[in-house]
Image (tube, rainbow, N blue to C red):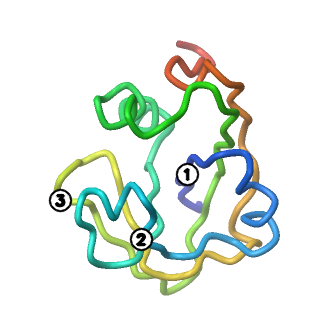
Amino acid sequence: MTTKYYHITAMENLESILKEGLKPQIGPRAREIGEKEAAVYLFPTMSDLEDALMSPWGEEAWDEDLDHAIIEVTFPENARIGQNTDVEYEVSCLDHIPPENVKLFRIEPAADTSRINFPGM
């Protein structure tokens, strides 16, 4: 069974992610907190993603006035994966994740990002 992970991004990034995959980066948020190594950050479960968005970091990091895409990810073979030591609900991948390993899971409309509705919850 393939393990699935989840990545959230602004809608403006969706087309290029579906076409090119996810590339390790040190983006603006990672730069702000002093990240030194380019990575793709993901959540092991939708519940972990929701927890992150409800945290003070999530409230600062995501603009509630914008639509967001939640991407479902499977890791390519031999991907270098690490557990974030600062937050247990996040993992990182140090390698490019090709487009065949990503697919749109769901679109979160503006103002709904902080209260994601999960089936059965």
Outermost residue toward the top?
121
Q: Which mark is residue 7?
A: 1
Quarter of the image where the N terminus is located: bottom right
Q: Which of marks 2 and 3 is nearer the N terminus?
A: 2
Give the alpha-carbon distance from disc 3 to disc 1, as whole Å. 18 Å
Q: Which mark is nearer the camera, 2 or 3?
A: 2
Q: Which residue is drawn at 50% across and 75% down?
A: 24
Indicate the amino acid at tag 2: Ile
Pointer 3 with pointer 1, Cβ within 8 A: no
**x, y (%) of residue 118?**
58, 21
Spatial CA span between label 2 and label 3: 17 Å
Question: What is the count of numbered marks?
Answer: 3
Q: Position of residue 67 (x, y in %)?
A: 70, 33
Mark 3 sits on what residue?
A: 85
Could you tell me residue 112's position as x and y percent?
61, 19
At 57% across and 26% down in the image, what residue appears?
A: 64
Q: Give the residue type at disc 1.
A: His
Name above or below for residue 51 compared with residue 44: above
Amino acid type, mark 3: Thr
**Label drawn at residue 26:** 2
Q: Nearer the viewer, residue 99 or 10?
A: 10
- Helix, strand or loop at label 2? It is loop
